[in-house]
Image: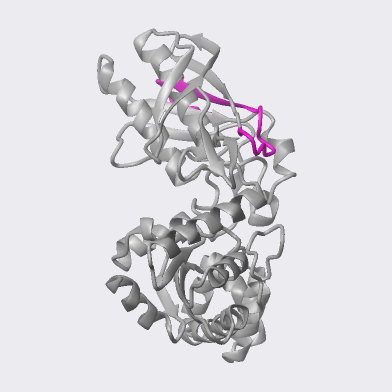
Amino acid sequence: MNTYVIKGKKKLRTGVTTGSCAAAAALAAARALILGEHPETVSLVTPAGRTIHLPVLPVETSGDTACYAVEKDSGDDPDVTNGVRILARVSCAPFENAKMPPFSDEAYPGISIYGGEGIGTVTREGLEQPVGYPAINRVPRQMIYEALSAVRDAGTGKRDLFVEISIPEGVSLAEKTFNPELGIRGGLSVLGSTGILEPMSEKAIIDTIEAEIKIRAAEGRRVLLSSPGNYGRRYMEDYLGLSDWDSVKCSNYVGDMIDLAVGHGFTKILLVGNLGKLIKLAAGIMNTHSKTADGRREIMVTHAALAGADQTLLTRLYAAIGTEEMLDILEEAGIRKPVTESMLSAIDEKLSKRAGEDVMIGAIVFSESYGYLGETPRAGELLEMIKEQ
């Protein structure tokens, strides 16, 4: 059954992530292997809490192995994987010819997840998976573990299970993605933090941001709280003691959020987010989508140079693939704090210029590895105002 979201007064059909497809295929294959069933559809509860029902296609069942596929539906915002088949092969024996080591989890003993054909291999530090492992992200792995564990519990015993995820078209499709630049070679990534793929029409997103700002204004909020996405919202809730429902999700459109907030009467704005996106603000990049601009390494190198980094360190920073790896390099060199402070000063300058002199604006920046990194001068005062409103 199709589901929809309303964005900018438009009804847009949602899709499913590659992670949901992989988990559904694994669930179907496990049911065929262990329970002797032949499902045509399977149901999953996604990390977003929504139950989805996905058609599954049998590929092969013989002996101690079963393989099923799910055809990915990207909804009204098709990406390069729309219509692609994602396969899961479940076996009672290890995959001896695997090109990469499998994932395992102490919470799910006896279950191993392999990357097969068309799944990229991580070749550089700084990503979620270790070097040499399949590019299957943490949330999709969790979904797969849970699916296999549930079927195994319903079966006859605690047998070991091995699942291989593959995307036959992955090698060619990966060239149309950012995977090569990220150091993921030979295939696609299995992604998804919520299990649901929402359409990403630019106008619809900006309209949605404006609608949320209008609601906050109507509620009489004095300070607008905003974050680019799920990481920022989780940080607000877990570390700042704020309800993520109080915030406006601005996605990549930080500049538009500021303009709309000011236009609807807000004179106080607090932005909370991960350095991976907010670092771009230090260069005045107010649309943080990678297709619009990157500049992360150039920005980091500039502020490291201002903090006294030598040529060797600057070269290492410029070669890094993401801000987490850059922070590791700065930490090792003992200059993470002054570099962060320099960037925060630039972020404050650019945000203040965009918002205007009559607006009090601030930012709190964190990272996945280091947590709280710092804040702009007026962020603490804004945070206290939000807690009181």
Q: How many marks?
A: 0
Specify the principal SS of the magenta part.
loop
Image point (37%, 55%), residue name: 245
Image point (43%, 76%), residue name: 373
Q: Is residue 97 visible?
A: no
Q: Position of residue 339 (x, y in %)?
A: 53, 84
The vertical placement of 322 against 122, above or below, is below
Q: Position of residue 178 (x, y in %)?
A: 68, 51
The vertical placement of 224 against 349, above or below, is above
Q: Which residues are magenta?
A: 74-97
Q: Nearer the viewer, residue 324 or 100?
A: 324
Left-right relation of 256 to 152: right
Image point (63%, 87%), residue name: 305
Asked whether residue 303 is drawn in magenta, I would say no
User: Splitting the image into 4 quarters, where does residue 232 fall?
Assistant: bottom left
Left-right relation of 344 to 225: right
Q: Position of residue 227 (x, y in %)?
A: 47, 63
Image point (54%, 41%), residue name: 6
Asked whether residue 77 is drawn in magenta, I would say yes
Q: Is residue 194 visible?
A: yes
The vertical placement of 135 against 219, above or below, is above
Quarter in which the C terminus is drawn: bottom left
